[in-house]
Image (cartoon, rainbow, N blue to C red):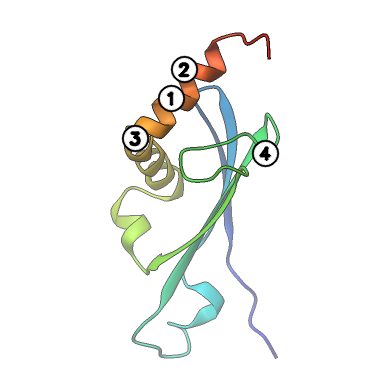
């Protein structure tokens, strides 16, 4: 019998994009089964506008595995996601994307 999975879902707005974050602190119950290398799983999905590009994904969806406890140490799923997005938004590629998104194009 497979134990119930504990997946938290939160929604937040980042720079005008509504994002859903799903977070499983103990992915597939590894720590509960005694694993010393337990992993957490975080998923980001842009839901409005649907599939909007984010600095961590061009498709509007990102699955990310990380060490258990890292998200909690950052203040939770939303705080972790916002910090990650803010950090990645400093790239020249993302700044160019934002500039092009603001500017009307004839082509």
Residue 24 in percent (x, y) is at 52, 64
Q: Which residue is mark 2?
A: 99
- Which badge, 3 or 1, is on the more N-terminal residue? 3
Q: Residue at x 52, y 80 (%)?
A: 29
Q: Residues within 10 Å of mark 3 (few under 14, many from 20)?
A: few
Query: Which sits in the foreground, 32 or 68?
Result: 68
**Which label is found at residue 51?**
4
User: At numbered mark 3, what does the secondary structure look like: helix, strand or loop?
Assistant: loop
Q: CA distance from mark 3 to mark 2?
A: 12 Å
Task: Please rate how many residues cluster around mark 1, counting C-alpha atoms within 10 Å: few if below 14, some from 14 to 19, many from 20.
Answer: few
Residue at the location (61% across, 72% down)?
Answer: 5
* Above or below, comparing residue 9 to residue 79 in the picture: below
Q: Compared to 23, does 60 lie above or below?
A: above
State the CA–CA distance, disc 3 to disc 1. 9 Å
- What's the residue at 35%, 31% (across, down)? 92
- CA gap between label 2 and label 4 equals 19 Å
> Split into 4 quadrants, where in the image is the N terminus?
bottom right
Rounded to the nearest angstrom, the CA distance separating label 4 from label 3 is 20 Å
| Label 3 vs 2, first from the N-terminus | 3
Residue 19 horizontal/vertical position (percent): 58, 37
Residues at circles 3 and 2 in contact by the CB criterion of under 8 Å: no
Mark closest to the chain's N terminus, 4 or 1? 4
**Hey, which residue is sitting farthest left in the picture?**
73
- CB under 8 Å between discs 1 and 2: yes
Of circles 4 and 1, the one toward us is 1
Which residue is label 3 attached to?
Answer: 91
Earlier residue among tags 2 and 4: 4
């Amino acid at each position: 019998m497979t134990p119930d999975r504990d997946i938290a879902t939160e929604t937040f707005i980042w720079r005008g994009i509504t994002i859903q974050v799903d977070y499983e602190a103990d992915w597939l119950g590894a720590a509960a089964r005694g694993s010393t290398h337990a992993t957490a799983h975080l998923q980001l999905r842009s839901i409005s506008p649907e599939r909007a590009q984010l600095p961590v994904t061009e498709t509007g969806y990102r699955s990310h595995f990380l060490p258990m406890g890292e998200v909690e140490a950052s203040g939770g799923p939303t705080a972790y996601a916002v910090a990650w997005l803010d950090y990645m938004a400093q790239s020249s590629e993302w700044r160019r994307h934002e500039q092009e998104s603001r500017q009307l194009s004839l082509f």
